Image (spheres, rainbow, N blue to C red):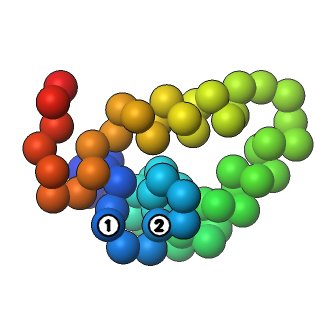
Amino acid sequence: MTALVRPQDNRMIGGVCAGLARRFGTKPTTMRAIFLVSCLLPGPQVLLYLALWILLPEEGKRSAW
């Protein structure tokens, strides 16, 4: 498995879905579809996305953590 980072390529908004797709070996489009479907269910999906956007380092940049 690769490191969980937000890649510079293939990102739409923050790169979170692209990073998760790369980490778990799926296509970014599949991960985005899973996220959109999960938004139909009750829960903090959008808050989780925002938290990952803030906490995940960008690819090629050193993390401050």
Classify residue 33 as left or right of residue 22: right
Q: Residue at x 35, y 54 (%)?
A: 6
Residue 11: assigned label: 2
Q: Residue at x 64, y 61 (%)?
A: 32
Residue 59 drawn at (x, y percent): 23, 57
Toward the front, the furthest residue is 13
Classify residue 47 as left or right of residue 54: right
Q: Residue at x 69, y 34 (%)?
A: 45
Residue 35 drawn at (x, y percent): 69, 51
Q: Is residue 26 visible?
A: no
Whether 2 is drawn above or below 43: the answer is below
Q: Secondary structure at mark 1?
A: loop
Local crowd size for mark 2, using a 10 Å CA cut-off: few (<14), some (14–19), many (≥20): some
Whether 46 is drawn above or below 25: the answer is above
Labelled pair 2, 1 in contact (Cβ < 8 Å):
yes
Q: Quadrant of the N terminus?
A: bottom left
Residue 31 drawn at (x, y percent): 60, 60
Q: Amino acid at mark 2?
A: Arg
Q: Which residue is mark 1?
A: 8
Between marks 2 and 1, how big is the CA–CA gap? 7 Å
Asked whether 21 or 55 is in front, the reply is 55
